[in-house]
Amino acid sequence: MTTIELLSEDLRFRQQAMLSKDGTVDKRNQAYAIANLCPTYLIEVTYGDILQAIERQSPLSAVVKNIGSVIMRREKLSDDPVQACHIGWCVLISYFETNILSYRGEHRKNNKGKRDKHPTYYIQVRNMDAIKELMSLINTDNVDLFPMTQAPNNWEYNKFLHPDTGVKLIKHAHEDAIRQVKHNDMTYLIDTLNKLGSTAWRINPFVFDVFKKTRNLKKTPFKYSKEVDREKKASLLIEINAIEALAERNKDNAFYHLYNVDFRGRIYPNTAFLHEQSSDNAKGLLLLDTPVPLGENGFYWLCVHTANMWGNDKVSLDDRVKWVEDNFRTLCSYVVDPIKNDDWMDADKPLCFLACCKELEDIAEWGVHKDPADFPSCLPIYVDGSNNGVQHLVAMSQDEKIAPLVNLVPQEIPGDVYMFIAEHAITRVGELLEKVKQSDKDKFDIFFSDWKETLNNLRSVPERTERSRLAWQAFGKFKNHNYQYIQDSMPIYWSKITDKKIWRKTLKRNVMTLAYGGTERGMGQQIIDDTRDLSEYHRDMHDSWGYKLGRVVHSLCYEKLPGPAKMLGMFERLAIQENEKNVPIAYKQIITEFPFVHSYREPETKRVKLSYGEDTLRINIQLWKEATLKKSKQKTGASPNIVHSLDAVHLTMVVHDADYEVTVVHDSFGCHAGNMGHMFEHVRHKFVELYNMDPLTHIMSQMEAEYLIPEKGNLDVSRIIESEYAFA
């Protein structure tokens, strides 16, 4: 029997147990709503959610609720989170019974470092081959989270649910936002979503072939090959397998996505894995289905994009083009023999870079006998905002001093706010180093060697064995014995890194997420996560050194970026004002009339009992209907969500007002190379148009909070139009 037949047979057995002797449904079974549904259909419609849950390492409570909710939405059943959990659990048991999945309990630590009394359960893969086989067996048209082989029907005006799929227009929407959808004139946004939904995509056959051939080589373009954490590696493998399987299923046909928005108005494809907002592993495989001639300047913009994908994006646009021209033969050699000539794997975005090389080589071959301007290009190329979150904060505060760092004014070479903060961080670490005792500095190399040996011992032993227990015991003893030295040696550790480029990579995401609610601890975690694969030295970093540097960077961002800091403080005070009223931050967005309602609430928690064999699992689910405002979350979330709502408006304007296909990844704007000359100007004009309408006052006035707006600087926002590097 095939995997899907085994799953269906097992599920059918439990469905029959829900029926009485006379064939009626026994409603005492809380999963009774699926008693008469086709089991194969149930496996198919929930497969995408299970795959995504494995990849994201989601808690079991979220998995069963999501699975059940998908089925209830498909069958137009009223929303009931408890019933959804039981339905989802009934389906998931089939994966346990067939030894495809299992579950494990883990006592997590809370914010105070104490272990939770009750375990949190997670699913884990026992048979990866079966998971992969399912992809080739199921009818993917039944899976909401997979690409569609036909363009989705349009969203309808003033309707919250999509007419065919039942997908919600706004994910995790507040009930106030749902009510406003029925009354606000959201034509502008709905037309934008429908335009994106009509965009057809194809798989790039050359890149996909290389994708498959390089998966298991010693040197590969995939991050999982360098990952040392077992669970993270498994998650990355799930993503790779899903992308490959979906690409294989769609390699000979065009495919589409249905798009919707989150509570801030940000646009997302309602597809998992294989889409333009996914990782380089998926993005590098994608072509637009309809070709557009390269035109007079398309080759120029393709060269700019190629240099960007390699990582050569800190020089002028002309220098990026020159870099491609100077290395043209080398770039084409990657296409001729990508296995032997494997330096393309060293690019920042390897598969996207390889796709560019293939396009360049095809254009060169076309140009032997035909005009390159007529070359039918399908490769989407992009221009990215220069730290777009900070750009919006600078535009709101009109901070003319910080504007050059995020390229909101014209200049000869691009400003670099990441390097600006990195250089200040190097200086600050140097100042901290001066306070460290010389004896502590002298013994660091020996200590770090011992620390590294302890970690390697831990990594080398099999999990859940006696050797593993002893290795963990030795690790704990070493850490406890050296506790104070570890706490004091952060400046020593970071002072050993002298390459400014490495510092920039280390702190880039910190600065990037400043506008999106970056906290001291959050920045520290980003440093830990983002540096593990930079080198062995970074891989073996003690977490406390990352967290301590995160505190340094957070302080520097507020100290050295005054205009953005003022805006962040203003939004926090706005949250405090609305908290005192006991209401969510809410406003009707400029231009789109999107109903922004802060969706942070304190839900009622209900404990649900799930049974499997002799096991009884107790999980917590959240009941949002009884929710109250979560004031602490509103306070920390105000800045990032309001900024996101503004970049969402800008993005919507760019897509809606372009008379050609546009593809977007929040602050990255893509189109055919032949249209990029216009897009390059268009994205700037829309940014200026937005800020000439004073969106900040528009937002604050709806909550009677104009008095919170601080004194602004003297930046002339219209100068963005002249800036080459604002979006490049």
Image (cartoon, rainbow, N blue to C red):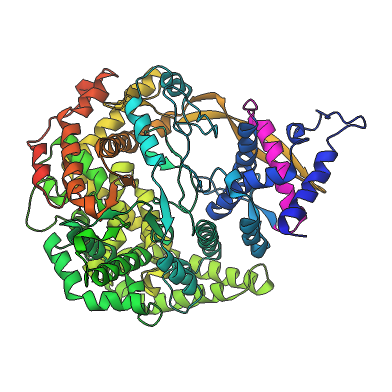
Left or right: 418 in relation to 196:
left
Q: Is residue 547 magenta?
A: no
- Magenta region, mostly helix, strand or loop? helix
Q: Position of residue 426 (x, y in %)?
A: 22, 63
Q: Which residues are magenta?
A: 76-100
Q: Residue at x 20, y 43 (%)?
A: 683
Q: Quadrant of the N terminus?
A: bottom right
The answer to which image quadrant residue 576 occupies is top left
Left or right: 601 in relation to 693:
right
Instruction: Kindly give the residue lying farthest to the front in the view shown.
Output: 369
Q: Position of residue 3 (x, y in %)?
A: 72, 58
The answer to which image quadrant residue 412 occupies is bottom left
Q: Position of residue 165 (x, y in %)?
A: 55, 35
Q: Nearer the viewer, residue 21 or 618?
A: 21
Q: Residue at x 21, y 21 (%)?
A: 706
Residue 326 can be seen, yes or no: yes
Q: Position of residue 693 (x, y in %)?
A: 17, 27
Q: Nearer the viewer, residue 627 or 635?
A: 627
Instruction: Kindly give the residue lying farthest to the right in the view shown.
Output: 21
